[in-house]
Image (cartoon, rainbow, N blue to C red):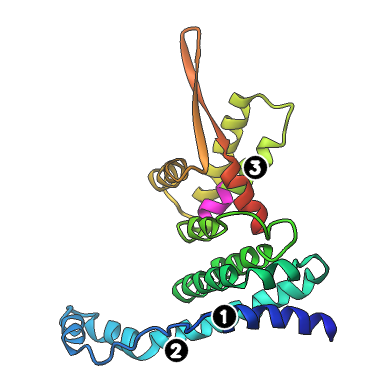
């Protein structure tokens, strides 16, 4: 009972410190917007019903489920929580909590909402509590999809294979991911787009190695990506 009370209090303190967590504004009074949506051929009435009748309730359900997941995770990690630091820096955690709520409310994917809850729980641990600019990791995560995370996780696994040369690692990981995504029906162009996107976000680094008669590219998971994955394990 003591464990549950402690972790529950952490979440309550973060929530209470928010001067006012703004519920998503009800837009049913925006008649001009509703008119435009309803005018969309074939699907206008369906979209109107979703956005103005069901969306708000659905977002609240997502938030409730995510907070339940967060509480469960905090209970599991109880002895590793940095309660003293959190209480002394509650404004920072209220800010992080608000970002967390915003992201889970807008993400329809249960998998990603669970990942956000894991990250938020990690921020409360002694290991990460004093880390600066924790919100950057939340923002980065909000830009990713489950497929991005598959690539990063597999990339980190290959990084640990010290006996395998870089060119072989690059070849193996691309073969694995190509097969993985083809089984899901993803075409090569989209797979390449996701890979390139990770490079642009600073999560994968591309290096060119010149060789006699040519050259090759190798890919490495950056420290930013490595910490991000640690936070959601």
Helix, strand or loop at label 1? It is helix
For this rendering, which residue is in front, 227 or 125? 125
Residue 201 pos. (x, y %): 45, 46
Label 2: how many Cα within 10 Å (few below 14, some 14–19, many 20+): few
The furthest residue to the front: 88
Q: Which segment is the magenta one?
A: 147-151
Residue 95 in the figure: left or right of residue 233: left
The furthest residue to the top: 212
Q: Please identify the dominant SS of the magenta region.
A: helix
Residue 26 in the figure: left or right of residue 160: left
Residue located at (29% from left, 85% from top): 46
Residue 186 pos. (x, y %): 45, 52
Residue 121 pos. (x, y %): 67, 67
> Residue 42 is drawn in which quadrant?
bottom left
Q: Where does the C terminus fall, quadrant-wise?
A: bottom right
Q: Mark 2 sits on what residue?
A: 57
């Amino acid at each position: 009972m003591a464990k549950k009370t402690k972790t529950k209090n952490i979440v309550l303190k973060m929530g209470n410190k928010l001067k006012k967590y703004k519920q998503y504004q009800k837009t049913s009074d925006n008649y001009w917007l509703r008119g435009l949506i309803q005018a969309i051929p074939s699907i206008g009435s369906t979209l109107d019903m979703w956005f103005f009748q069901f969306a708000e309730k659905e977002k609240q359900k997502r938030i409730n489920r995510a907070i339940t997941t967060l509480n469960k995770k905090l209970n599991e990690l109880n002895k590793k929580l940095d309660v003293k630091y959190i209480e002394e820096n509650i404004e920072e955690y209220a800010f992080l909590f608000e970002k967390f709520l915003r992201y889970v409310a807008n993400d329809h994917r249960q998998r990603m909402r669970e990942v956000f809850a894991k990250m938020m729980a990690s921020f409360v641990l002694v290991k990460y509590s004093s880390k600066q600019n924790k919100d950057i990791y939340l923002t980065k995560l909000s830009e990713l999809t489950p497929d991005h995370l598959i690539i990063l996780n597999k990339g980190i696994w290959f990084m640990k294979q010290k006996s395998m040369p870089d060119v072989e690692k690059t070849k193996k990981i691309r073969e694995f991911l190509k097969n993985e995504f083809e089984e899901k029906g993803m075409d090569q162009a989209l797979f390449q787009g996701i890979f390139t996107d990770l490079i642009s976000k600073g999560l994968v680094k591309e290096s060119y190695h010149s060789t006699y008669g040519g050259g090759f590219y190798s890919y490495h998971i950056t420290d930013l990506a490595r910490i991000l994955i640690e936070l959601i394990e």
